[in-house]
Image: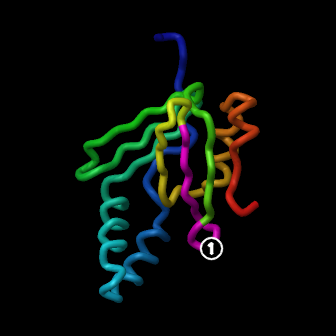
């Protein structure tokens, strides 16, 4: 539809703190898989939150793309990480599928923006774990 403008609220990658914490943990051999995962996220994971949709580009070399329109969202749950400086977000769709967003910077503000776009039913079941 040519008349509808899509305004970007947030576009970028995961929070740098996720990478730093996992690199420090990588010095213990046990946490090496977590470090590799954080490096892959830092290199190829990108989020785009607009007034119309949530887009996550990720996977190996950034080859996977997921687009979710707000009308498809049944529930959004956030979990703070990194001493509250960033957080994880799980978007559950009406068909039961889930979109996981890890190490989202400013996740509280982004959650508030997304919550405004949800249906009243989805808003009532969404929220932060532990609040």
Residue 79 placed where, x, y %?
A: 61, 60
Q: Residue at x 50, y 60 (%)?
A: 103
- Viewer-proximal residue among 33 and 65: 33
Q: Main secondary structure of the magenta part?
A: strand
Q: In the rendered image, which quarter is residue 36 located in?
A: bottom left
**Is 22 placed above or below 47 here?**
below
Please give the residue where the numbered disc 1 appears in the rendered image. Answer: 83
Quick one: which residue is furthest to the bottom in this view?
A: 28
Q: Residue at x 36, y 61 (%)?
A: 42
**Is 52 placed above or below 115 here?**
above
Q: Which residues are magenta?
A: 81-92
**Is 112 placed above or below 105 here?**
above
Within 10 Å of the Cα at label 1, are there few (<14), some (14-19), or many (20+) other Cα atoms? few
Q: Was residue 37 drawn as part of the magenta stretch in this picture?
A: no
Residue 51 placed where, x, y %?
A: 59, 30
**Is 9 placed above or below 89 here?**
above
Q: Residue at x 49, y 62 (%)?
A: 15
Q: In the rendered image, which quarter is residue 112 located in?
A: top right
């Amino acid at each position: 539809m040519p008349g509808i403008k899509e305004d970007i609220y947030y576009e970028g990658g995961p929070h740098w703190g996720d990478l730093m914490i996992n690199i420090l943990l990588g010095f213990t051999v046990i946490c090496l898989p977590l470090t590799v995962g954080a490096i892959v996220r830092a290199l190829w994971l990108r989020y785009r939150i607009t007034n119309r949709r949530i887009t996550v580009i990720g996977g190996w070399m950034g080859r996977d793309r997921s687009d979710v329109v707000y009308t498809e969202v049944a529930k959004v749950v956030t979990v703070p990480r990194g001493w509250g400086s960033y957080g994880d977000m799980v978007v559950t769709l009406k068909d039961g599928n889930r979109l996981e967003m890890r190490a989202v910077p400013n996740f509280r503000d982004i959650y508030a923006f997304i919550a405004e776009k949800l249906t009243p039913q989805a808003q009532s079941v969404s929220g932060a774990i532990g609040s």
